[in-house]
Amino acid sequence: MLKLAREQILLGQSVATKSDAIALLAGKLTEAGLVEAGYVDGMLAREAQHATYLGSGIAIPHGTTDTRHLVKSTGVMVAQFPNGIEWDEGQIAYVAIGIAAKSDEHLGILRQLTHVLGDEQAAAQLKEATDADTIINILTGATAAKEVQYLTLADFPADDRDQLLLGAAARAKSADWGDAAMVSALLASDPAYLGEGVWLARAQAAQTGWVLATPSTALNAGELPVSAMLLLCAADSGHLPQLENLAKLAAAGQLATLAGGEGLAMLQAGPASGLSDTFTIINPHGLHARPGAMLVKVAKEFASDIRVANLDGSGEAVSAKSLMKVIGLGVKCGHRLAFRAEGADAEAALKGIGEAIAAGLGEGAH
């Protein structure tokens, strides 16, 4: 979880260029004891490789892997530029978040930041904020509307359906979606059988989200198979679109797909359409800004709608044409990305994306 203090927020800054902005942030990171003085060179080098502008008026300058040895402690500095800075041609940044990361911690920071900053309204509030607390609340999600969350519990060693439900409930509780009372209520409930081995349990909770749990071995509840347990935690009406997709999957005879690797993506998207393929990321440091931007660039070359889900992450499917969404997947080396393309050039799109990933997304094959 990203934690910010008031001294990390630089309000009302004014500089001429993005290089000046980076120097300002690097200087503050150095003063805070997070990095050595030479870290600024790594930040400028990263920017030369590929601009770190994310969109929505937000930039996230950070160092290269070659300058990680200069990082003493992972942390961030946030600078607000109310008048804006031309970060790249035609791209104006109003907030820049300087990141220092010793290893891959920055992927977690990026994931949280991009989740919050994908909101256009939040970006406007960051631009116009006049106090540090407002910026802290926005960046840490304290004032952000809660989106539907997704969790997986794959190959859970359950002996029966109730143990699988217990595992799903414990997973939700560990994510602070609910408390012990929620778990007790779930264990006292009777899950509904949807068909094709899929069961649905639901509970009132503090956070709206879905847990998809699958057993490590084949199970039965009486004469009915148990291949997947869907746990719906409901705090509001945000879950209604997924319930509609469940109905569509049932009507299409595709409920069984929920037990596969793309289960959560199917829950979000509904019945399968278009073409799909899965590729493994080989970049040693995962999809940080540069390879992430290359992936998005390749996806944008095609007219098809392209969605991608990290099968080794949350499983949430996002647009492969949004840099913020792609970086927000928290992809590390070895993670499997499931792509689904729908459109006239879907086959060419998947082929192009697969080739780009195999080539290292601009960082060379390894």
Image (cartoon, rainbow, N blue to C red):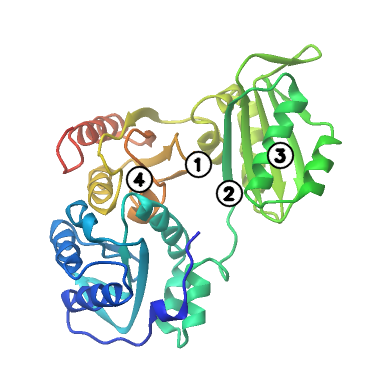
Q: Nearer the viewer, mark 1 or mark 3?
A: 3
The disc label shown at residue 320, or none: 4
Q: Which residue is mark 1?
A: 314
Mark 2 touching mark 3, by CB under 8 A?
no
Earlier in the chain: of badge 2 and badge 1, it is 2
The type of residue carrying mark 4 is Ala
Mark 2 touching mark 1, by CB under 8 A?
yes
Q: Nearer the viewer, mark 2 or mark 3?
A: 3
Does any portion of residue 193 appear in the rendered image?
no
Identify which residue is drawn at 35% across, 45% down: 320
Label 3 residue SS:
helix
The disc label shown at residue 149, or none: 2
Mark 1 touching mark 3, by CB under 8 A?
no
Q: Local crowd at mark 2 within 10 Å, few (<14), some, or many (≥20)? A: some
Q: Nearer the viewer, mark 3 or mark 4?
A: 3
The type of residue carrying mark 1 is Ser
Mark 3 touching mark 4, by CB under 8 A?
no
The type of residue carrying mark 3 is Ala
The type of residue carrying mark 2 is Gln
Where's residue 139, x and y in %?
47, 69
Q: Local crowd at mark 4 within 10 Å, few (<14), some, or many (≥20)? A: many
Earlier in the chain: of badge 2 and badge 4, it is 2
Mark 2 touching mark 4, by CB under 8 A?
no
Q: Nearer the viewer, mark 2 or mark 4?
A: 2
Earlier in the chain: of badge 3 and badge 4, it is 3
Does any portion of residue 293 appear in the rendered image?
yes
Q: Which residue is mark 3?
A: 169
Calculate the distance from the C-alpha at mark 2 to the C-alpha at mark 3.
14 Å
